[in-house]
Image (cartoon, grey):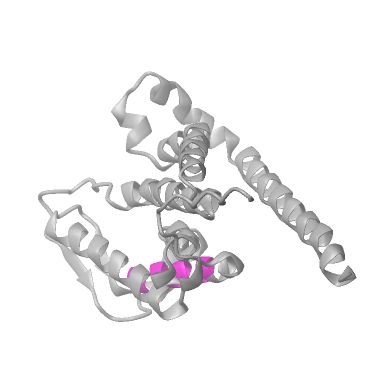
Amino acid sequence: MNHNVSLSAPPRRTRSIVLTSLAILGMASAVFVVRRPLMMSAPRCMAGRWHGCFDTFNGVVLIALAALPLAALVVWALARRRRAAGVTSAWRMSLAEVGMVHGTVPFLWMTMMPGAGAGTVPGRVSLVPLRDLLTMGPVGIIGNLLVFAALGFFAPMRFAVLASVPRILALGAGCSALVETAQYVLRLDRVSSVDDVLVNAAGAVLAALASRRWWRTTEEAPSGRPRPAPAPAG
């Protein structure tokens, strides 16, 4: 009997429970710290008003947090459907798909918010690396790191072809370049900066490294076919 195998399962399960609990505790603590600014947007969001809700950082974050139960329900429904079809890693795939969308769309919405001179001010471009980084400040740097963090965290968990640091770096940089190009073309009164691309890509890579132990490998790629039923004995 292999005692090492039997004894390694409980510590792994305990570690997963501890990490999940710490993540939930950290999220709850963050919400508690920023509860007052978020609650300032609650009346307008509940009234369905655009101004003061959908066009503010607090309002978008509040809506994203309020949508968490719906996101969890979608994860459960997708995982249940996949498990019924015999797909392996049904929960991980479903969580990764919903996590990529729910964690990225709010940040994309905020980055595409028009400024006061949108439509009238010509597009501005900053192509000198690290020049704008000095003026971003800690809040700006953290915000840019988080734009594609969910994409970097969950994409290699869902797609084996993206389970490498260079590919996640290319994915984050490519998506960020598209956003910066859209800001310039649509004349949103924003500066399309190469530093935004660099920080966005770095955030995607850092998030991907945090989820590396759950990356999907080629051997785990689902076939999408139901598992064959075992042949009856005799």
- The residue located at (41%, 71%) in the rendering is 162
Which residue in the rendered view is the most extreme toward the front?
234
**In the depicted view, which residue is nearer to us: 222 or 74?**
222
Residue 10 visible somewhere in the drawing: yes
Q: Position of residue 161 (x, y in %)?
A: 39, 71
**In the depicted view, which residue is nearer to us: 146 or 115?**
146
- Looking at the rendered image, the quarter that the N terminus falls into is bottom right
State which quadrant residue 10 falls in. bottom right
* Magenta-highlighted residues: 195-208
Residue 217 visible somewhere in the drawing: no
Q: Is residue 205 magenta?
A: yes
The chief SS type of the magenta part is: helix
The answer to whether 82 is drawn above or below residue 157 in the figure is above
Q: Position of residue 11 (x, y in %)?
A: 82, 61
Q: Is residue 119 magenta?
A: no
Q: Position of residue 127 (x, y in %)?
A: 25, 78
Q: Is residue 137 left or right of residue 4?
A: left
Total of numbered circles in the picture?
0
- The residue located at (67%, 49%) in the rendering is 26
The answer to whether 217 is drawn above or below residue 15 in the figure is below
Q: Position of residue 111 (x, y in %)?
A: 32, 53
- The residue located at (10%, 50%) in the rendering is 120
